[in-house]
Image (tube, grey):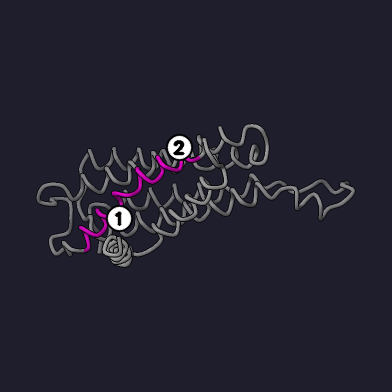
């Protein structure tokens, strides 16, 4: 079964696939004439860490994009434009990953991490805008038989994205490790299916 969003989804899948593949290019193979190969491999730990985090993030973004478009079945010019802005953010990730890997553990680590976090702030913002536009009003771009409760849970989960990444940016000024930890926690949170994430947030509110 095809929908109006078929070409948009295929294009987006291609962008995600290319971006996630480009990440590995930052991890360089040590020269054959290094004195200690094991030590040289260990020295590349910032590249491994940045690759792991960004691979997880892009994979999770792809999962969430797929989740959105199980509900979105129609498209228009504005939706296409918002999706292009989102893809722009995805394309930036390999660069910000390389920047972070090159400076993590050095003097420019804080600036590199702020740039890295800022890219994800933009992505989270456009994810939220894309979904809110599709689900706005009477949900004219959603499937006719869409589960309204499921759609609302997606909205609630995405509401935390921009604010959380803004906190990560602010935290980078105080603690680089804490900011990286926030990134990892957010990756886990957005990997959780919306109905589980909604239950977790509800329980947390009830316990406060």
Q: Residue furthest left?
A: 138
Within 10 angstroms of label 1, few (less than 14), some, or many (20 or more) residues?
A: many
Quadrant where the image shows the N terminus = bottom left
* Residue 169 percent across, percent down from the top left: 46, 38
Q: Judging from the image, what secondary structure is the residue with disc 2 in? A: helix
Q: Main secondary structure of the magenta part?
A: helix
Q: Position of residue 177 (x, y in %)?
A: 57, 47
Q: Tell me where the magenta segment starts and ends, as one range.
A: 150-171
Pointer 1: what residue?
A: 157
Which residue has dot 2 on it?
Answer: 170
Magenta span contains residue 4: no
Who is closer to the viewer here, 150 or 156?
156
Looking at the picture, tell me which residue is in the foreground, 31 or 8: 31
Q: Name the residue located 9 percent from the left edge and 51 percent from the top edge.
A: 138
Name the side, left or right, on which 169 lies relative to 38. left
Question: How far apart are the alpha carbons under marks 2 and 1?
Answer: 21 Å
Q: Is residue 152 magenta?
A: yes
Q: Residue at x 17, y 59 (%)?
A: 143
Which residue is drawn at the image coordinates 65% and 47% (left, top)? Answer: 47
Q: Quick one: label 2 or label 1, which is nearer the N terminus?
A: 1
Farthest residue to the front: give it.
208
Q: Residue at x 27, y 57 (%)?
A: 154
- Dot 1 falls on a residue whose secondary structure is helix
Q: Position of residue 168 (x, y in %)?
A: 45, 43
């Amino acid at each position: 079964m095809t929908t109006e969003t078929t070409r948009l989804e295929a294009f987006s899948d291609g962008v995600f696939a290319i971006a996630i593949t480009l990440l590995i290019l930052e991890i360089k193979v040590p020269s054959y004439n290094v004195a200690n190969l094991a030590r040289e491999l260990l020295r590349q730990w910032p590249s491994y860490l940045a690759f792991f985090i960004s691979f997880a993030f892009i994979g999770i973004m792809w999962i969430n994009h797929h989740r959105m478009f199980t509900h979105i079945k129609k498209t228009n010019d504005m939706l296409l434009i918002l999706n292009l802005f989102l893809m722009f953010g995805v394309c930036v990730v390999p660069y910000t990953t390389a920047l972070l890997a090159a400076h993590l553990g050095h003097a420019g680590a804080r600036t590199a991490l702020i740039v890295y976090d800022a890219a994800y702030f933009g992505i989270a913002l456009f994810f939220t805008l894309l979904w809110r536009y599709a689900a706005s009003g009477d949900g004219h771009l959603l499937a006719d038989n869409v589960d309204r409760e499921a759609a609302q849970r997606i909205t609630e989960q995405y509401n935390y994205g921009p604010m959380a990444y803004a906190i990560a940016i602010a935290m980078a000024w105080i603690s680089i490790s804490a900011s990286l930890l926030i990134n990892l926690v957010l990756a886990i949170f957005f990997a959780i299916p919306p109905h589980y994430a909604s239950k977790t947030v509800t329980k947390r509110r009830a316990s406060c």
